[in-house]
Image (cartoon, helix red, strand yellow):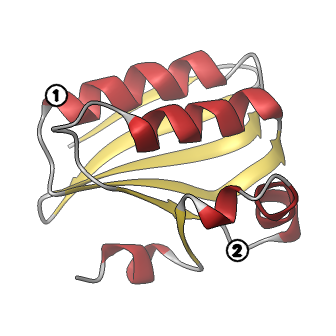
Amino acid sequence: MAETDASAAGTVVLEQRDGAAVLRVSGALDLALAPKLRQFADRASRQQPAVLVIDLTDVTFLASAGMAELVRAHRGDSGSAPLRVVANSRITLRPLQLTRLTDELAVFPSLTDALSP
């Protein structure tokens, strides 16, 4: 089962996959879409998944508001699931590298890699 929220800025989809919660984000992850990502990440965390994956494969722009939500999801509550981020393009990976978030976040090149134990 998947939950979706679409807006002019982009889309956030929450899926369950083998005990993992996967948030697939598409479009511009900026000030307009970041609150939806927060809402869906909070909803996913309440389901107590083994891991939370945020897939940025279809993101066309990654703003500081989006990166702040990644950090928030990563730091979360002490009992929350570990976060894995899928970033494989220059559009998403470069801002994470420039801000040194790749040092803090677990970044994977594909969803398959992020879901691997």
The picture places residue 32, in percent across and down from the top left corner, at 73, 16
Position of 6 with respect to 21 (left or right) is right
Q: Residue at x 67, y 23 (%)?
A: 33
**Quadrant housing residue 65:** top right
Which residue is located at x 22 percent, y 82 percent?
A: 117
| Mark toward the start of the polypeptide (2 vs 1) | 1
Crowding at mark 2 (Cα within 10 Å: few <14, some 14-19, many 20+): some
Query: Is the residue 10 above or below the residue 112 in the image?
Result: above
Q: Residue at x 22, y 40 (%)?
A: 80
Location of residue 73 in the rendering, given as x and y in whole percent from the top left corner = 44, 37
Direction from residue 116 to residue 112 in the image, left or right: right
Q: Is residue 116 depicted above or below 46 in this figure?
A: below
Q: Amino acid at mark 1?
A: Arg
Marks 2 and 1 sit apart, C-alpha to C-alpha, by 28 Å
- Above or below, comparing residue 45 to residue 42 in the picture: below
Q: Position of residue 27 (x, y in %)?
A: 74, 40
Residue 100 lies, in percent from the top left, at 76, 59
Secondary structure under the numbered disc 1 in the rendered image: helix
Name the residue that disc number 1 marks.
Answer: 46
Q: Residues within 10 Å of mark 1 (few under 14, many from 20)?
A: few
Q: Is residue 96 left or right of residue 77?
A: right
Q: How many marks?
A: 2
Mark 2 residue element = loop
Q: Nearer the viewer, residue 89 or 99?
A: 99
In the figure, 54 relative to 110: above or below? Answer: above
Q: Residue 6, located in which quarter of the rendered image?
A: top right
Q: In which quarter of the view is residue 86 placed?
A: bottom right
Amino acid under disc 2: Asn
Residue that badge 2 annotates = 88
Q: Are marks 2 and 1 in contact (CB under 8 Å)?
A: no
